[in-house]
Amino acid sequence: MQETAPTPSHPATPYTPTDRTVPTRSPGRASYDRELVHAILDEAYVCHLGFVRDGAPVVLPTLFARVGERLYVHGSTGSRPLRAAGQADPGLPVCLTVTHVDGLVLARSAFHHSINYRSVVVHGVALDVTDPEEKRQALDALVDHVVPGRAADSRPANRKELAATAVLRLDLTEVSAKLRTGGVNDEPEDLTLPHWAGVVPVGKTYGTPIPDPDLATDTELPDYLRTR
Amino acid sequence: MQETAPTPSHPATPYTPTDRTVPTRSPGRASYDRELVHAILDEAYVCHLGFVRDGAPVVLPTLFARVGERLYVHGSTGSRPLRAAGQADPGLPVCLTVTHVDGLVLARSAFHHSINYRSVVVHGVALDVTDPEEKRQALDALVDHVVPGRAADSRPANRKELAATAVLRLDLTEVSAKLRTGGVNDEPEDLTLPHWAGVVPVGKTYGTPIPDPDLATDTELPDYLRTR
């Protein structure tokens, strides 16, 4: 039996700060707001997953998905972190981080240059998902997290593919968001310097989908790809 | 005296693979090509820096810059990783990872869905930079890495700002790139399934720079911001 994920008494209940989730610097930029954390997570599909191997840190990019108060990552059953999580009891201590860059902040002083960003850091123990139904739902969520609506429009994993895929679960309990928004924070005495100052917005863009050469020519682009 | 960074005998000499930089999965996607690693690093300005605190992994997004075979990150002297690196002897074991997402790969089967990406993972020990000249150069590089040409067009850090800023150096010795490029890899028996398949390109976009409200109205947008 796997543990059940924590269910907040109310979706708007913020995450409880812990020693690890209260930053030493710029604590005013930290947030424990559940909806904000969910929104930052859901806008991303690649996270950076950290774990410890032989006493040293390892950080790897990987796809992830959120289902309620649980995050899922997946990979080959042969990959090192997934093998380690399956072998560890009660699981693999991880730190999962998601970051969006929203702007380049160009101050008049080099010191006050900055980045507008939104990030979420999740600390916890990743558990190997052994329940077949939870595993199936997690794999659907991983596909839908990248392209909403896509899981239903693809061939589901067969028994062999399911067996080759390991899924890890990380509960959202020790979580914080950190954000920088807004403009330039120059020193008052620097405001008359001749350097341009301001914010360069940064965003993500999707290009025109490139069909697979083997695609039947009458296959239409699905609606879920038109709206991007 | 700080150690000198390794100087490769020839810029085209690849990085030497180690146990940590040879992936267990998809080793064909790994590369140790120095120019490729540099190009992936230089296209990014935010990395995810992993370190170990109280036995648990921590992954934080942070700005970085490359100067030859050295990477630099910076932060407040009060921040936890920078404090830890200054106190640790010979430094702080870290893993620094940079990832670009280039495309969403939509296969006919859920299993073969993937992401086109380019990533670099650097393992090593981060050292506190104490030499004032190296620190100044690193800070210029950090500004220029985000916006090339900007360091010369801003007020350099003064003594107080320099004292408040810690810079860490990480030598590029144990390094690998990992890439996925190209199209869909469906199973032959899935090619006739009715699902659309192909690649959705993903890229980064820069919006129109937003001037600081305090900027003198005759301040022109610098050339290094026009070319983006």
Image (cartoon, coloured by chain):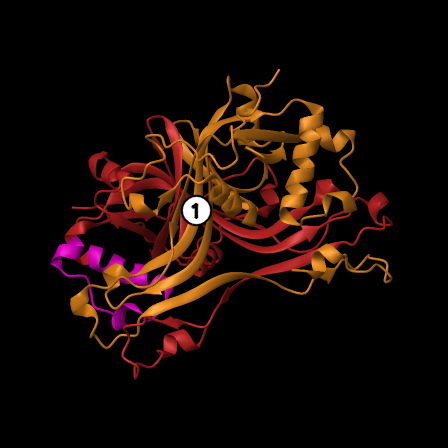
Chain colours: A orange, B red
Percent from the top left, x then y, of residue B135? 21, 55
Secondary structure of the residue carrying tag 1 is strand
Name which quarter of the figure residue B148 lies in: bottom left
Residue A26 seen in the figure: yes
Q: Residue at x 46, y 63 (%)?
A: A202
Assess whether residue B161 is covered by the magenta stretch: yes
Residue A44 seen in the figure: no
Vertical position of residue B31 compared to residue A185: above or below: above
Assess whether residue A184 is covered by the magenta stretch: no
Vertical position of residue B217 compared to residue A209: above or below: below
Vertical position of residue A155 compared to residue B200: above or below: above
Q: Residue at x 31, y 59 (%)?
A: B142
Which segment is the magenta one? Answer: B134-162
> Hey, what amino acid is under mark 1?
Ser
Q: Residue at x 66, y 58 (%)?
A: B200
Q: Residue at x 50, y 47 (%)?
A: A40
Name which quarter of the figure residue A109 lies in: bottom left
A85 or A194: nearer the viewer: A194
Disc 1 target residue: A119
Percent from the top left, x then y, of residue A97? 46, 41
B63 or A35: nearer the viewer: A35
Give the left or right position of residue B126, taking residue A204 as reference: left
| Chain on which label 1 sits | A
Percent from the top left, x then y, of residue A34? 48, 39
Name which quarter of the figure residue A122 lies in: top left
